[in-house]
Image (cartoon, rainbow, N blue to C red):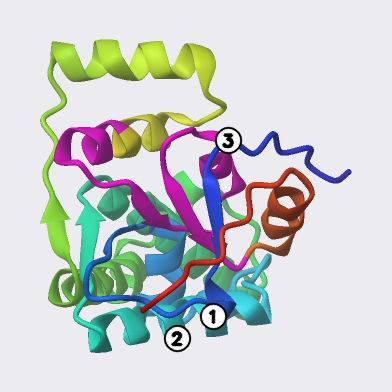
Amino acid sequence: MPINYAIRAEVVALGSDSPQSSDSFLVDSNVWYWLTYSRASQAVNGPKSYQLKHYPDYIRNAKSASAKLLHSGLSLAELAHLIEKTEREIFIRARGLSISNKEYRHNYPTERTIKVVAEVEDAWEQVKAIADPLNLSVDESTTNAALVRFKTQLLDGYDLFILESMTRAGIFQVITDDGDFATVPGIQVFTANQNVITAARNQGKLLRRQYR
């Protein structure tokens, strides 16, 4: 069933956009996963071809343009989860097993150390080399603000805190494939997600940036 996104952000189709030195982008976890994890394409529900091409290309172009790239510490948790899930799927296929995440984690600790830990460490070193940290203190003020946002915006828990950290840092540009961000007012969503782009075009929210 197609997702009926109510677009409230300004949406930029990154495939036809050129990053500028004045840009400051928060890069979402899904983009880091495709960019830094070498075995992402081996997941059961692997990335689509546009995800493996357009997002890495745009990140490279942003670096070349001296745009500011930022990462959230919350992305480490999401990356670790996704990488462990994919490594378990690869392990299951190779061994012909059927095991849960917890069984993989506890019953095969050597494989987890060699594969999961090494891959997560490598991915996170790449993230730190490419982008600066966007700091966030998860205190009572932050959680209260996130809860208020949760009542009015269609986001999951991680995204609530990522958006709160963006707001506090004065960052309003995000590179993501996640259509949920497109429902948030006051930000610019740079995406190659065609469903989001089409919805934004139909709702008059697709932004084509003009450069001097």
Tags 3 and 2 touching, CB below 8 Å: no
Res 122 → quadrant: bottom left
Q: Is residue 183 magenta?
A: yes
x and y, in percent, of residue 52 in the image: 55, 81
Q: Which residue is mark 3?
A: 8
Q: Of helix, strand and loop, which one carries label 2?
A: helix
Crowdedness of circle 2 by 10 Å Cα count: few (<14), some, many (20+)? some
Seen in the image, is 55 located left or right of residue 96? Answer: left
Relative to 181, is 130 on the left or the right? Answer: left
In-image side of 11 versus 102 (left or right): right
Q: Quadrant of the C terminus?
A: bottom left
User: Label 3 to label 1, Cα distance in Å?
Assistant: 23 Å
Which quadrant: the N terminus?
top right
Q: Give SS at disc 3.
A: loop
Q: Which residues are magenta?
A: 164-192
Give yes or no for contact between labels 2 and 1 (Cβ–Cβ under 8 Å).
yes
Which is closer to the viewer, label 3 or label 2? 3
Measure how far apart labels 3 and 2 are at the Cα level. Answer: 26 Å
Mark 1 nearby-residue class (10 Å; few <14, some 14–19, many ≥20)? some
Residue 57 is tagged as 2
Residue 95 x, y percent position in the rendering: 60, 75
x%, y% of residue 193? 65, 62
User: Any mark on residue 54, and which?
Assistant: 1
Crowd around label 3: few <14 · some 14–19 · many ≥20 (10 Å):
some
Which residue corresponds to the image point at 49% horizontal and 49% vertical from the top-left? Answer: 101
At horizontal 21% and vertical 60% (from top left) the residue drawn is: 70
Instruction: Place residue 144 in its image quadrant.
Output: top left
Indicate the amino acid at tag 2.
Asp
Amino acid type, mark 1: His
Q: Secondary structure at mark 1?
A: helix
